[in-house]
Amino acid sequence: MCKIISTLGMEREAWLQLRKGGIGGSDAGAVCGLNPYRSPMAVYYEKTSDTIDVSDNEAMRQGRELEEYVAQRFMEETGLKVRKSNKMYWSTDYPFMYADVDRLIVGEDAGLECKTVSPYSADKWEDGAVPLHYLVQCYHYMIVTGKRCWYIAALIFGQKFIYSKIEWDETFVNQIIALEEDFWNGCVVPKRIPLPDGSDSSSAVLEAYFRESDNEGAVTLTTDMENKLDRRQAIAEKIKQLEQEKTQIEQEVKLFMDGHSFANSERYQVSWQMVDSQRVNTKKLKAEQPEIYKKYLQVNQSSRFTVQVA
């Protein structure tokens, strides 16, 4: 069962505020740790922060505007009819879960998720495969709406149009519910930030949280944190060794090429060529045209993390 809220005519900011009250389909893959572009920490920040992100970009705009095209292509390929929902569905069994669905299938107890995909990600859709975070998104919609199957259709720019039908899987569904419930009740409700996962997404959240922190003084490192820093030092040393080995291999290949610009085999294509690059000589510009230098000088603020061994 689910509660239904009409979104027809709803202001975008009000819609975004409403989404803060639960986990949506686009959040589900990240919450389950399966989204390569978004971390659980990022979802937590969005749900608990006082700000509403109304930003937009070209990729987001193209995704919205091409959604109708993907739906039309799906109807052409399958013979099925779809309609817009213009509703937000909230689960009554799991009140921390909601669904904003792209389309519903007319005459079938199913829905449709529309995607636009970069050709660089085309390999992730080969042989009928669906990227895991999108698969979780579709199961999330089934859980909330009570439907037992969902379609996903994808336009791979400049290459092809594909679609898949996803059937209900009780085991997978129960795992998703458990992970989302643990995230909501274990992190969002008690305001307990989830652990980072090493992704750029987690780094961005930490910057957002502590960029303007004015905590003075120092905290005492625990034994656990010291052990982590020991591990960090060992990793840094290993990276240094591997970088040197990598450079040595490149030097050996260059020596083998004996001045040639290219080297080829069935598995590799190697090039070693001079490349011209242009950049402003800021040191000279500052010395000879200080006013122009000052006019176009841009200050970027970022945090710096350093570790010194005592």
Image (cartoon, rainbow, N blue to C red):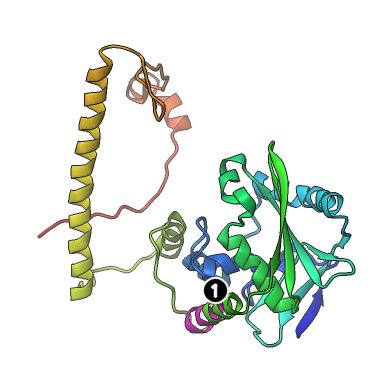
Choose between 121 and 266: the one closer to the eye.
266
Residue reaching furthest bottom? 93
Q: Residues within 10 Å of mark 1 (few under 14, many from 20)?
A: some
Left or right? Give the position of 117 relative to 237: right
| In-front residue for pair 6/177 | 177
Which of the two residues, 39 or 256, is positioned nearer the viewer here?
Answer: 256
Amino acid found under the numbered disc labelled 1: Thr
Q: Which residues are magenta?
A: 180-188
Q: Nearer the viewer, residue 128 or 143?
A: 128
Q: How far across and how far down the image is residue 162, in percent?
A: 71, 49
- Any magenta on residue 169? no
Residue at 57% x, 62% y: name it: 133
The answer to whether residue 279 is seen in the rendering is yes
Q: Residue at x 41, y 22 (%)?
A: 279
Left or right: 248 with respect to 89? left
What residue would you read off at disc 1? 48
Q: Position of residue 233 (x, y in %)?
A: 18, 56
Magenta part mainly helix, strand or loop? helix
- Identify the residue at horizontal 47%, vertical 31% (top origin): 296
The C terminus, quarter of image? bottom left
Measured as percent of width and height from the top left, residue 152 is found at 71, 59
